[in-house]
Image: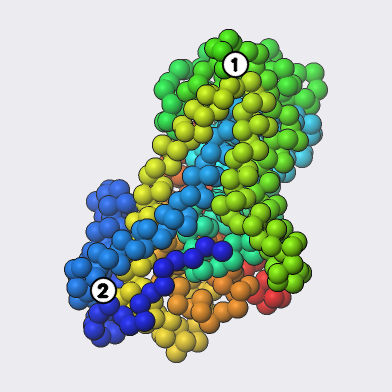
Amino acid sequence: MLTLLAAPAEPATSAGDAQLVVAALLGIAAVVVLIAWGKVHPFLALILGAAVLGVVAAMAPDTMIESFSAGVGSTVGGVGLLIALGAMIGGLLAESGGADGIVNRVVGRVSGTALPWAMAGVAALIGLPLFFEVGVVLLVPIVLLVSLRTDVPLMKIGIPALAGLSVLHGLVPPHPGPLVAISSLNADLGLTLGLGLIIAIPTVIVAGPVFGNFIARYVPATAPAALLPTRHPPTTGGGRRGPGSPAAVRARESVGRDAGRGPAGDDDLLTDDDLVNPGSGRPGAPVDDSGTETARRTPRFWPAVLTVLLPVVLMLLRAVGELTLADGTVARQTLDIAGAPIVALLAGVIVAMFTLGYQAGFSRSQVSSVLGGSLPPIAGILLIVAAGGGFKQVLVDAGVGDLVADAAKDANLSPLLLGWLVAVGIRVATGSATVATITAAGIVAPLAATLDRPGVALLALAVGCGSLFFSHVNDAGFWLVKEYFGLTVGQTIKSWSVLETIISVVGFAGVLLLDLLL
């Protein structure tokens, strides 16, 4: 379980309720305006918003700084390590060709009518350790080629893939949003993970294949010619994400050779021999530790799948042990240690080094390079999450959280509904799911004390669902989807924005249903 530093017994200010309300509104408004209108980086916007909140709430400067620093430190210590370890697993999965192998095995062995379901499943699977943007970069070349080769409408395949990635990004650790919500609310990670997976399955089905089949009739998108896989992809340096990034180049190379040969004779879209995996773009061709170039190998399918699922399984086993095993038994202690988030993800990294890195032919130095290269792209995410933790702690220490909790009790408003609505409002205003999760979780954190363990886990999931609501022009993901699929702004709103809204609403409905059953 992730924990935060305990808030002081007494609020750090003597401001009245009205002043605290104004302080909270102005602090959040400052973040919204700076991000949406001023185009200020969310890291700086959250720091400045916390300053506005503290000043208006009449917090002493040294107290405000101490509160913000404590929030940053506790968030990085609890969440930052997990994000970094998850990025390492994702980096090895992407750069070794393991992701390509998973896509090839699943997509290449299904018929046209089952392709949308297969794409949703593949996206959800490889989306476990990968951030949304990286997953898009990996999957889009495959989606474009599959649509081209099978004559299945692009939206019919693309929407399920996006749904699988987005649902996992918003609801399931080790993605930043769910981790921040779990940390802020002091929720049980294993229980939240299990409930999140239960909600994710029907949400992916409704928002993916079902909605994709519907919207394909109204958004007749075609694969952009400039993004179709080619034999000679551009060469770029590492670190940048986009059509010319190392991951995108590798993904295009993996399908480009097959695309150049013309239609296949059967449903086997890609063969294992067609997958070309040039590594990370940083280490180059595989070499042994003496410097001799070695043959490139595609990681095997089942080892790659089990590597991705290992941290999830360990954390779920810990949650099961907490429910079924007595305290103090050897089995319970073993599961508690193995299922601790940092241990589970560290185990995943170590296993991935062998099943993905060395299996692909990388030397020890190349594996180290891939692991190190996976960290710079997440630096911005870590900073935003850290600053959000500081903003949240200033909210808590000023007494705003207790004020909101008291107001919710008086209004008889469900904590789950309040968390979802607050996240929805901030998401629509700022365009950032992470900022929405951080801020909403901080505001409703005191309400978690009134809930049981399943209730706290569901509150974290409600906040995560709200943070995905209606992505539009102030969200970088909106433009990423628009450009990759060659859509107009209107078509992107009809497809992607509506997709995100469906995920948010259906996911929250699942939260409410589980709340009734548990």
Q: Which amino acid does label 1 sit on?
A: Asp
Left or right: where 8 falls relative to 340? left
Give residue 9's quadrant in the image.
Answer: bottom left
Q: Furthest residue to the bottom?
A: 410
Res. 11 mark: none
Q: Mark 1 points at which residue?
A: 288
Left or right: where 417 falls relative to 452? left
For the C terminus, the image quarter is bottom right
Q: Name the residue under label 2.
A: 23
Image spot of residue 319 (x, y percent): 68, 63
Image spot of residue 130 (x, y percent): 56, 42
Give residue 321's quadrant in the image.
Answer: bottom right
Give residue 387's quadrant in the image.
Answer: bottom left
Identify whether 119 is placed above or below 323: above
Label 1: state its secondary structure: loop
- How far apart marks 1 and 2 lie (CA) works out to 59 Å
Number of labels in the image equals 2
